[in-house]
Image (cartoon, helix red, strand yellow):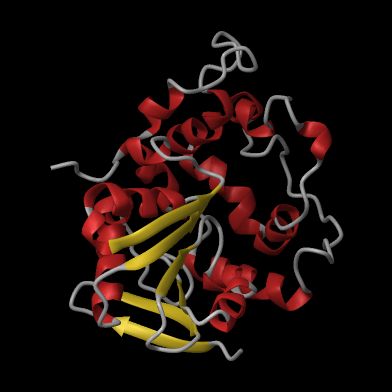
Amino acid sequence: MTITEHTVKTDRHTTFYLAAGPEEGPLVIFAHGWPELSISWRHQLPALAALGFRAIAPDMRGYGRSSVYAQHSDYAQEHIVRDMLELVDALGREKAVWVGHDWGSPVVWNMASHHPDRCHAVANLCVPYYTLERGLEHTLTLVDRDLYPEDTYPAGQWDYMRYYEESFAESIAPMDAQAYRFVKLLFRKGNPEGEGQPAITSTARRDHSMLGMAEIPDLPRDVDVATEEDLRIYASALERNGFFGPSSWYMNHPVNTA
């Protein structure tokens, strides 16, 4: 099934997106997370298209070929949700099935919470409802304090977010300096032996490192997860647009509930 490239431009924003499937088919929109791109859904798009859906995957605000902004405030949830509403409008549709992954999940949950009339259904990976879209302070109340005692892990697995907020330049420097190595580190299978153990992100401030390491190791590519071309596309986009930006703002500026 062919995947095609498209762009929606409005007075306020430009969204690049990939599309597959019949234009009249039921609409499914996939919202990627950090630090990803529309191509993260490259396997799902043709699979859904083959079932008759119109499958769409945008580069989210700040990523890839969509508009990039200099201020953290430009990545507030209400702006991103509005981007998605404008995308649906440009497609000539009223509703979509929304699928979010990672930092795309707060976007689709906010779509369901504040624009239910624009949703056929909502699904997500990694981030459950009523968590990140409510902000960091709310999310910290849900930390498993048996696994993350507050005196040792004050922000639980979300300590890396505090590190990012408090030491922005230090936290992003290794990733910006070695984007290719970092995507190789991220795009690999997980280790089941880590189940039930504190996440490496839980000591970010103590370690002065987002992932518990001063330098990004040059690990072999996980051939089961990404091709060399995939990694180069991700690294090139991140080097061009900057590695970090919206995530911390999402946590402390949930979408306006008015």
- Vertical side of 79 occupied by 171: above or below: above
Which quarter of the figure is the N terminus placed in? bottom right
Q: Which residue is more in the foreground, 155 or 129?
A: 129
Q: Which residue is more in the foreground, 109 or 232?
A: 109
Q: Residue shown at 50%/52% (left/top)?
A: 124
Residue 188 rendering spot, x and y as whole percentages: 76, 55
Q: Residue shown at 56%/63% (left/top)?
A: 36
Question: Which quadrant of the figure has residue 14?
Answer: bottom left
How many numbered circles are shown?
0
Residue 21 rendering spot, x and y as whole percentages: 50, 86
Q: Which residue is more in the foreground, 168 or 106?
A: 106
Q: Residue furthest left?
A: 258
Residue 123 rendering spot, x and y as whole percentages: 47, 54
Q: Is residue 235 left or right of residue 19?
A: right
Q: Residue shown at 27%/46% (left/top)?
A: 113
Q: Residue shown at 37%/53% (left/top)?
A: 107
